[in-house]
Amino acid sequence: MSALLRAELIKLRTTRTFAALAGVALATSMLITGLEAALDDPSESTVLVDVFTSDTSGLFILVLAIVGISGEWRHRTITSSLLAAPARVRFLIAKTLAFAAAGLLLSLLVSLAISILGSAILDSRGMPVPAAGELVEQGARNALVAALFGAFGVGIGGLVRNQPVAIVGVLMMSFVFEPGLIALEPDVAKFGPFASLPLGIQDIPPELIGWDTEIFDTLPATLLMLAWIGIFFAVTAILLRTRDVE
Amino acid sequence: MGTAIEIDGVSKRFGKVEAVRDLSFSVEAGRVTGFLGPNGAGKSTTLRILLGLVHQNAGSATFGGRRYEELPHPSSHVGVVLEDASFHPGRTARNHLRILATAGRHPLSRVDEVLERVGLSDAANRRVKGYSMGMRQRLAIAAALLGDPDVLILDEPANGLDPPGIRWMRELVRAEAARGSAVLISSHLLAEVAQSVDDVVVISHGTLRAAGPLESVLGSSEGPTTRVRARDLDRLAQTLRAKGFEPEPDGDGGLLVRAEPEAVGAIAAEGQVALSELVRVSRSLEDAFLELTGEAA
């Protein structure tokens, strides 16, 4: 498994897509954090959530994971991948772990960057700055979301192999359908993996983004997210095992 | 040297289409075997079944008794070039091979070795999207050689190669067979195959039409035929008829006899007829192929 995992990590590192999207994740996170820190007037109790939850790496690693696995079919590299790793479920596990690890590392890097930038700007404005421990905890929450999104993206991309459809579908779910469902059926929408559960894991109060509803706390939100990943992984694994690679 | 690949009663159906039907043949170590058939004959499906990429409906396809996915480190035993070998266009050749070497647990030093062997060292750090078809084919062959395998499966390996490349590929497969590897080449380039292979397997419509050493498959369906010439052709004809043969003019000053050259030569010697030519007549591989696959005009 370790060899397959290393191979998947090399795959990740050796295309421009990863570098480009990771760069965009870092840039957008720093831009949002910089603007929040420069323009907002947070109190001591709200500064952490107001300024330091702008890590966009979760979204980008989700897209990267979808691109990563659906690209195996798009570029027809699935054949050489399965010739090197004929145990198809092990291949899927390796890919899932690789994108989870990539999400974790990318988010930690982004969290470090926005912590330094946000703290510096707030401090220069004489605004309250969160304690280091709080920043570390928030960074860990952000990283957990990104890791889970990395794994989730592999399940989605393995199931919906049409790359544009998968990416557009995920963006629509994240920004249109799930937020819309919050307004219509909040008791159902709080189980949503694209917006509600990540919010719970990051411990962001829903009212901060204008949601008048309750969401799950960190632990149940994490477990529910793992359940979503498990469902998508299981279906993808079954299809991968049974389908012919022509 | 032993059987390296065993296909036993393999059948595969795609919906209503029966792509392969009860197909059986074997590939021996130390020999190059040509796997021939017209387009749609079931060659690629058979190879993909052998490699565990396509699930057969019946039969077994094994390497030394083990299915591909049961081999401990498959790419150390089996090197593969499939017809539609594809690469991530944004990745360099070296990185493509690094990934395969890592996944297959081969030393990374093999990457540069195989790049050197296929003549791609100078282009190793270029992205594959800038490669010509021939360069991609060489890269696919490099990937197949990474694990120093004892079985090579090459589906249309000459695709995209220029004449020097084809010669290089021919020498490569002969060298691999000489060191004991089993080489299975699927190809539609019959003239090329004829120069490279020891054995042939011919399939058509998913069923086996012929299998065996090249010479035996090329031999006429009516038995061996010999072309013979002599200064005294009438006397030679009489001598052969006296021994029960029915020589026929070949239209070019010689005779065709349905017999092995050794037998014809012995009869001529016994009758004290001096021969100027004695040669076994084979069908061309193309003739044999068309006859066996039922596509002769």
Image (cartoon, helix red, strand yellow):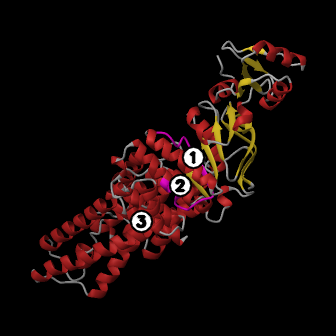
Report the mark closest to the observer, 3 or 1: 1
Q: Is residue A151 visible?
A: no
Chain assignment, label 3: A
Q: Nearer the viewer, residue B191 or A233?
A: B191
Quick check: do tags 2 and 3 share a chain?
A: no
Q: Residues within 10 Å of mark 2 (few under 14, many from 20)?
A: many
Q: Position of residue B95 (x, y in %)?
A: 40, 61
- Identify the element where label 2 is drawn: helix
Q: Position of residue A165 (x, y in %)?
A: 41, 46
Q: For the image shown, how many numbered marks are present on the structure?
A: 3
Residue hosting label 3: A10
Q: Residue at x 50, y 41 (%)?
A: B158
- Specify the label residue B225 is tagged with: none
Q: Residues within 10 Å of mark 3 (few under 14, many from 20)?
A: some
Q: Residue at x 21, y 70 (%)?
A: A33
Report the mark closest to the observer, 2 or 3: 2
- Identify the element where label 1 is drawn: strand
Residues in magenta, as a range: B142-160
Q: Position of residue A9 (x, y in %)?
A: 43, 67
Residue hosting label 1: B154
Q: Are marks 2 and 1 in contact (CB under 8 Å)?
A: yes
Amino acid at pointer 2: Ala
Spatial CA span between label 3 and label 1: 27 Å
Check if residue B110 falls in the magenta segment. Answer: no
The quarter of the image holding the N terminus of chain B is bottom right
Q: Is residue A147 placed above or below B195 in the rendered structure? A: below
Q: Position of residue B232 (x, y in %)?
A: 75, 15
Amino acid at pointer 1: Leu
- Specify the label residue B144 is tagged with: 2
